[in-house]
Amino acid sequence: MATIIPQKAFYLQGKTLSVRFRVEQLKKLKHCIKQHEQDVMDALAADLGKSACESYATELGIVYEEISLHIRKAAAWSEPKRVGTPLAAWPAKSYVQAEPLGVCLIIAPWNYPFQLVLAPLIAAISSGNCVTLKPSEHSPHVARVIQTIISEAFKPAYVQAVLGDAVVSKALLELPFDLIFFTGSPEVAKHVMGAAANRLIPVVLELGGKSPCIVDEDANISQAALRIAWGKTVNSGQTCIAPDYVLVHRKIMQPFTDALIVSISRFYNGNPLTHTDYPCIINKTHFNRLLGLMRDGEVIFGGEHNEETLKIAPTLFSVKNLDSPLMRKEIFGPLLPIIPFDTINDAIQFVNQRPKPLALYYFSGCKQSRKLVSRRISAGGITFNDTLMHFTNPALPFGGVGNSGFGSYHGKSGFLAFSHMKAVMERATWIDIPLRYPPFGNKLSILRWFMK
């Protein structure tokens, strides 16, 4: 079983405090990934049926961009930042110093099994931490490639990858890490948070939820349909920010549905079950779970499935029972309920009656309506007139709110997630104002003048 005693000892040596050391490690990591790029693609194809193009766009490419950004910015982000000093504390200099937390645990999911391990790892290295990684056992081919890359790039006392099932994860949660970064379901997150609470370990929880699309009557129907179809079919809908359901203005319900069918059909030449660009469901358990959800709605389009290849065609539903499992649980697959609404306030109310989503997508040409939706609906992130794309911008923090998680990462947000922002004040020695020292006498009036 893994231990973090060597990692604790290595961290205390202070080597990771050097920004030059961190940048060297990031460059080494990037080189090792490049050396195993084809292995990563082969593993993603074996575990999830991903094409080379989708593997690069949604996994490798994002990781390369993240590493390059941290290599460029780690030094600037690590510099102490001067802040103001109040008159009552004068003369002094005040600044905020980012310091690493120590030894961090990253527990990753199976749906983007490479990117969702490496992106937080990059941030953790950039901010000066030692790391233990736990890839998902449900994507075993990718997990083994990750372990190979990590073992070639780093000594285990610095960064290590630990393979195994839920028993291994549970054992890791018993260790005294300085931060736990977890990506997965809200149900499992409660156990992670409970284990962390026993040791007062801070956590970052990147969870999921039912991310809605709202298509208003003034939306560009064909473009909205195309972009929603893409967002739902990437990785066969096994994306934490995939559109979970679509609220469509009643006036455009039929033309939007028709456009959605056209877009999906064009993607896969009318037969996604045999198309090499269409990924499979991760395993038989999730395949059967999705088939069970299909019974909760009336199929408008799709519904075909192949048990041998674990593929389920993109499937559109009309839903009459809004309390069915299809509408209560995160779908995490290529099933898309379509629900009509009459006014934007009705749509807002519908979303707000449910747990806060990880993402929200609103399609409208009206700036005032977009502002209204942004103000009235709380979500981890919002993309207007598209889906998923806010995830691709490292300048934007990515994370949830409420039931969809807390804490964020990507770019500088990731650096901060793995850092403690330490307050530092340097007091002058050439003068000492006696105002704060007893006896106080009539100093109250002076204090009132200083501190107001």
Image (cartoon, grey):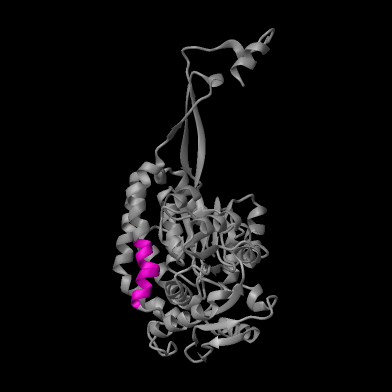
The structure residue drawn at horizontal position 48% and vertical position 15%, both measured from the top left corner, is 429
Residue depicted at 49% across the width and 60% down the height: 366
Total labels: the figure holds 0
Going by the image, does 398 lie left or right of 452?
Answer: left
Q: Closer to the camera, 173 or 279?
A: 279
Pick the residue in front: 207 or 346.
Answer: 346
Q: Can residue 63 be found in the magenta stretch? A: yes
Which stretch did the figure color magenta? 52-64
Asked if the magenta segment contains residue 198, the reply would be no
Q: Quadrant of residue 48?
A: bottom left
Would residue 105 be visible to someone looking at this image? Answer: no
Q: Does residue 280 appear in this view?
A: yes
User: Which residue sits at x=53%, y=59%?
Assistant: 369
Q: Is residue 261 above or below residue 427?
A: below
In percent of width and height, residue 200 lies at 64, 49
Q: Is residue 387 above or below residue 376?
A: below
Task: Between residue 102 and residue 377, name the one nearer to us.
Answer: 377
- Left or right, 232 with reference to 337: left
Hey, which quadrant is residue 347 in on the image?
A: bottom right
**Taken as a whole, is the magenta stretch helix, strand or loop?**
helix
Q: The N terminus is located in which quarter? A: bottom right
x%, y% of residue 69? 35, 53
Q: In the rendered image of this protein, does residue 385 appear above or below residue 421? A: below
Image quadrant for the C terminus? Answer: top right
Residue at image location 65% in from the left, 63% down from the top: 349
Q: Residue 12 location, x and y as percent?
A: 47, 44
- Residue 379: horizontal and vertical position, in percent? 57, 59
- Taking the image as shown, residue 167 lies to the left or right of residue 429, namely right
